[in-house]
Amino acid sequence: MTTTGPPAPRTARERFREQMTTEIKDVARRHLADAGAAALSLRAVARDVGLVSSAVYRYFPSRDDLLTALIVDAYDAVGEAAERAEAATIGAPVGERWGALAAAVRDWAIGRPHEYALVYGSPVPGYRAPTETVDPASRPALVLLRLLRDGVASGEIADGETGRLSRGLRHDLARLRADVAPGVPDAVLARGLLVWTQLFGQISFELFGHLHNVIDDTDALFVLQVRATTGVLVGAP
Amino acid sequence: MTTTGPPAPRTARERFREQMTTEIKDVARRHLADAGAAALSLRAVARDVGLVSSAVYRYFPSRDDLLTALIVDAYDAVGEAAERAEAATIGAPVGERWGALAAAVRDWAIGRPHEYALVYGSPVPGYRAPTETVDPASRPALVLLRLLRDGVASGEIADGETGRLSRGLRHDLARLRADVAPGVPDAVLARGLLVWTQLFGQISFELFGHLHNVIDDTDALFVLQVRATTGVLVGAP
DNA sequence: TGTACATCAGTGAACGCGCGTTCACTGATGTAC
DNA sequence: TGTACATCAGTGAACGCGCGTTCACTGATGTAC
């Protein structure tokens, strides 16, 4: 897919429009915290921006389009954080790189809990994600897959046993490999999925309150768990 | 805490009231699917039950109380499923018991995805969970902790290294052990938390659409991952 | 550089709708004597 | 067994509110000649 964005805005009108779009999204993001995605209200956003409600329709054709923009932005933000963490650790041992990636995702989630909930929490009822959310949604996982590829290539990540796999799962993993993870064997893909879902499970538990009155020092728990998943990832004996 | 429920209902009125309460909750549960918790509407529920909206207030003093009842029921349902799975595997190897527990949780989640989202997805905005949700919420995890205790006692679950822990985390784990997991060492508690968060991360990814177009045979993936987390849990070398 | 026209952001009123909650009431069921 | 009273489920109207979206409009900005 070759998406060449529009050229840099030139006229005052175009610059103004971009600014206004950003401001509307910023206010809407703030509203996510109080009201949640399901109750995100165009009218309330308009009020806070200082516009009459119908004016927002100059920027977003409907409430769902505004929601889509927020979702795309959220995936792009966590994706960029993940990519930066990966880029910053090029050449480091793969375990360290995984730790940096996991920490980047968690830091983003803690910093923007409502955007995390928007994309990794319960789906917004009545909202059908349009196809334009698909590519941004895959950005963070692509970083993990790149790590797997590098680790396998360098020999830092060991192959392993998977036991007998179903036809369907073998096909799923083969497709994943062909599309985005050339050379990464089934066992490594499976372990990658394991640590990836563990990461998001851990973050969700922390942010959604399931560790309340159980674990107070969630930072320390996270460090401990990343140490463990690093072992799983590289296939430590 | 000794909560002795009311004695079995006797009068026709009492039986009728119980039936009506159940029906309201059942309809509300169905509405979760279409509208989501945030948009759950007392009026809509009343309409579907065949009541005028104000009549619902005879059963639930407010919308949030109805929501609380649904949340408590959901935790109780998944807790009961977990307890049943554990009870059905008494005497079996701890790895098998963990597999049964994990499968019970996932089966419940797949069967009632909207109730899963209600309690394990994004928190309902504007809703403050009252204390009466705390006990039901801990039921499923207590089953896991019982498994850890049994596994440690029987020697099936090996101790392990945690590396240096922070004061805070050591305290958290000690409290957990004192309250609900006597005799379970830090390393085992940590591994328990790891597989537990992995389980919910995996279920959330599956139910919330993050495996769409990636893994079709999610059953097979789940089996594979449970095999892996069993190894983590028992501390297989 | 000046002018005519097109584009566009924003306004304010209106549409039809649904929401949670309160209240005075009616009529049926349960209880005490 | 019969009667007087208390309890309770359900009614229907009303409260004040906010929502998404449409539409004809005004006035400012941009474009073509």
Image (spheres, coloured by chain):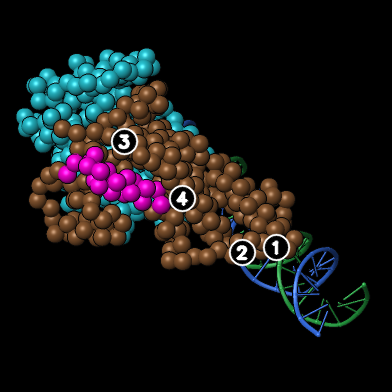
Chain colours: A cyan, B brown, C blue, D green
Q: Are marks 1 and 2 in contact (CB under 8 Å)?
A: yes
Instruction: Establish whether labels 3 and 4 are both on one chain.
Output: yes
Mark sitting on residue B10: 1
Labels 3 and 4: the sequence-earlier one? 4
Pointer 3 chain: B
Q: Nearer the viewer, residue A117 or B146?
A: B146
User: Residue shown at 6%/29% (left/top)?
Assistant: A91
What's the distance in space between the residues labelled 1 and 2, CA to CA? Answer: 8 Å
**Residue for badge 3:** B93
Q: Nearer the viewer, residue B236 or B171?
A: B236
What's the distance in space between the residues labelled 1 and 3, CA to CA? Answer: 45 Å
- Could you tell me how many numbered marks the image carries? 4
- Count neighbours of disc 2 (C-alpha within 10 A) and say few if under 14, some if 14 to 19, many if 20 or more: few
Q: Secondary structure at mark 1?
A: loop
Q: Amino acid at mark 1?
A: Arg
Q: Secondary structure at mark 2?
A: loop
Residue stretch rendered in magenta on the structure: B139-159
B20 vs A117: above or below: below
Instruction: Establish whether labels 1 and 3 are both on one chain.
Output: yes
Task: Say which quadrant the C terminus of chain A sits in.
Answer: top left
What's the distance in space between the residues labelled 3 and 4, CA to CA? Answer: 27 Å
Labels 1 and 4: the sequence-earlier one? 1
| Residue A149 as seen in the image, left or right of residue D11 | left
Image coordinates for residue B38, horizontal then vertical, percent: 50, 51
**Residue for badge 2:** B7
Mark 1 or 4: in front is 1
- Count neighbours of disc 3 (C-alpha within 10 A) and say few if under 14, some if 14 to 19, many if 20 or more: few
Labels 1 and 3: the sequence-earlier one? 1
Q: Is residue A124 visible?
A: no
Instruction: Establish whether labels 2 and 3 are both on one chain.
Output: yes
